[in-house]
Image (cartoon, rainbow, N blue to C red):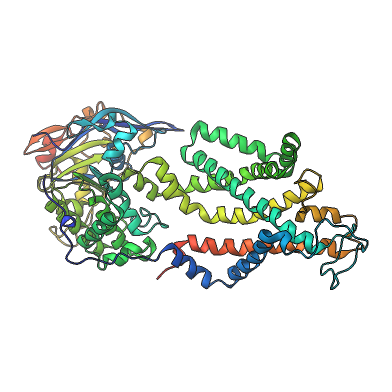
Amino acid sequence: MTATLPGDAPLDEPIALQRPTRRQRLRAVLGADRKAQVGLAVLAVFAVAGIFGALIAPYDPNAMAFDMLTAPSWAHPLGTDDLGRDLLSRIIVGTQVSLFVGVSTVGIALVVGVTLGLLAGYLGGWLDDIIMRYVDLQWAFPNIIIAVYLVAVFGNGLTNVIAAVSLAFVDDFARVSRSMVLSIREEQYVAAARTVGVSDFRIMWRHILPNATAPIIVQATVSVSYAILAEASLSFLGLGVESSTPTWGLILSDARSFVSRAWWLGIFPGLAIMLTVLSINFIGDALRDYFDVRETAG
Amino acid sequence: MAALLEIRDLGVEFRTPAGVVKAVNGVSFDVGRGEVVALVGESGSGKSVTALSVLQLIAQPPGRIAGGRVLFEGCDLLALDEAAIRHVRGRRIAMVFQEPMTSLNPVLSIGRQMTEALRLHLGLSAAAARQRAVALLDQVGIAEPQRRLRQYPHQLSGGMRQRVMIAMALSCEPELIIADEPTTALDVTIQAQILEIMQDLCRRLGVALLIITHNLGIVARYADRVNVMYAGRIVESGPAAALYRRPAHPYTVGLLNSVPRLDRPRGRPLEPIPGSPPDLHLLPAGCAFAPRCSLAEAPCRIAPPPLRALGDGQASACFEVERLLAGVPA
């Protein structure tokens, strides 16, 4: 058979094969989304605080003074704590670790959890049984208890806290992605991809995963807030990052005995956590729109 | 010369809670090079399962190839391992599915999906694959192919999506295209266009076409040869023209009588086949069609009739075929 498709013939004129690049699409989605812009702006402020930390803090975050538990004033915009430490400086310096822990734990948990969920859902069989029984086991314990246990065994410190908190969140991602895969793998376009000769790995990666992004992103944005709070809980129990590093969680837990007398000690670190979480949620919504090509008709 | 695709005594079983179901039972037929062959049957007759088995696309379990061989250019496809069959899929044998709405991945652009096979099987660069995709879309009659490549499936109509599927099937110059109910989900006007394009391109490029359908109109117009399936077996096979002129199985006769035809007097009522298709869990010992057949005699209920040649390439699996052809009304 020597028939050739007309496709083999040279085309008369070169065709400009441009399509909207990812960057153009991202810009289009963000340009139309006010909330995402606000979220990015807020996160940018926190990022600056996180990067420059001690350089821009008005005081040494650990320097004690005699003006203890003073209300917000010009000298101390957010007030001072029970040891006379400047709250604004502590929050600014704490940004770095809190954001880093929040984002990196979710990042690790997402990669590991989604991989497990994809394998379990797509391949099924004994692998599914092993992975999901493990996930069930983890599901039976509150995340924070797993994190406490791991930190207690392996000791505290930034790396161990991140490892412990991310492991504690793996099961959520595995469960969400597996349930998506179970329904998506029955779709005819997956069968169609197989008939074209696409390998299992590529089907999982290129054909199934892009269809499962929306719930995974939602799960990720929610988890960031829990991760920041989990770090706070570990700090509260004395199992967090070393106590010389102020983190938002640590500041909050230090404040627990004084909030009735000094409202600012509870409000401001809480506000920092809330703003971060809200911003990440806004950005998460925009990302979901970006990944959902069906909403960008035209 | 041996046929391109030779299916020999294929059996496929499914394990279900109610027992093992023989969805395909001793099916044999050939598809020659460049030939258009139709596999006709109602839902559950095993025609799709037969087609999927060719490319090892039956989910195992619950499915199982119980026996037989599928020879493609003399090579048994059922004996190939996963890596080897992947090189056949899409490259040598391509498929077009029933639902163009769901056969394209909603979140990948048309271009991405079309170039995947080209890059995978032909090793083309991204630019070369795109250029070829443009040419292929043009060939199946899609205007502004460059723009379409950038679009997503939801931005295309059903007919256009099926054209895209056909373009994808043709993309790696396969020797055989299996089309599983290619037009069932489309409007009647679009159906004709799609079939014309498919037949035209296959003839021009020398690609063999196996059409799986329940639509006898499609068979009459486009197929060279026809295999009629009932309850997992082929009950009649032969050239399309002969099958219409002289149906040699009561089931075929029943099918032809139950669709409106322009060559019959108007106003004549359609004659449906009495009864309903058999439960594959409880197949009768004899001919599966016997309970619905007016010609059935004692032998029909004892053992399934073998496919017997009648000359002119026609064959029928009916003990009473002589009486049928002699004009006893079925």
Q: Is residue A278 visible to us here?
A: no
From the viewer's perspective, is B73 left or right of B288? left
In the rendered image, residue A165, in percent from the top left (x then y), is placed at 68, 45
Q: Give the quarter of the figure containing the C terminus of chain A.
A: bottom left
Q: Is residue B239 toward the left or the right of residue A121 in the image?
A: left
Q: Is residue B13 above or below residue A198?
A: above
Towards the viewer: A41 or A189: A41
Q: Position of residue B215 (x, y in %)?
A: 24, 52
Instruction: Point out residue B19 in the picture as x, y percentages from the top left corner.
Output: 42, 30
Instruction: Give the side of residue B98 with respect to residue A63, left or right.
Output: left
Image height check: is B44 above or below A251? above
Give coordinates of residue A177: x percent, y percent.
54, 47
The quarter of the picture where the N terminus of chain A appears is top left
Residue at the location (34% across, 39% down)?
A: B57
User: What is the total number of numbered labels drawn onto the structure image?
Assistant: 0
Is residue A79 something one can see in this rendering? yes
Residue B303 in the image: above or below residue B73: above
- Residue drawn at x 40%, y 40% as measured from the top left: A200
Q: Residue furthest left?
A: B312
Give B52 or A82, whichever is nearer the viewer: A82
Viewer-nearest residue: A34 or B161: A34
Q: Quadrant of residue A201?
A: top left
The residue nearer to you, when weighing B138 against A39, is: A39
Outermost residue on the front side: it is A55
Q: Residue at x 23, y 45 (%)?
A: B40
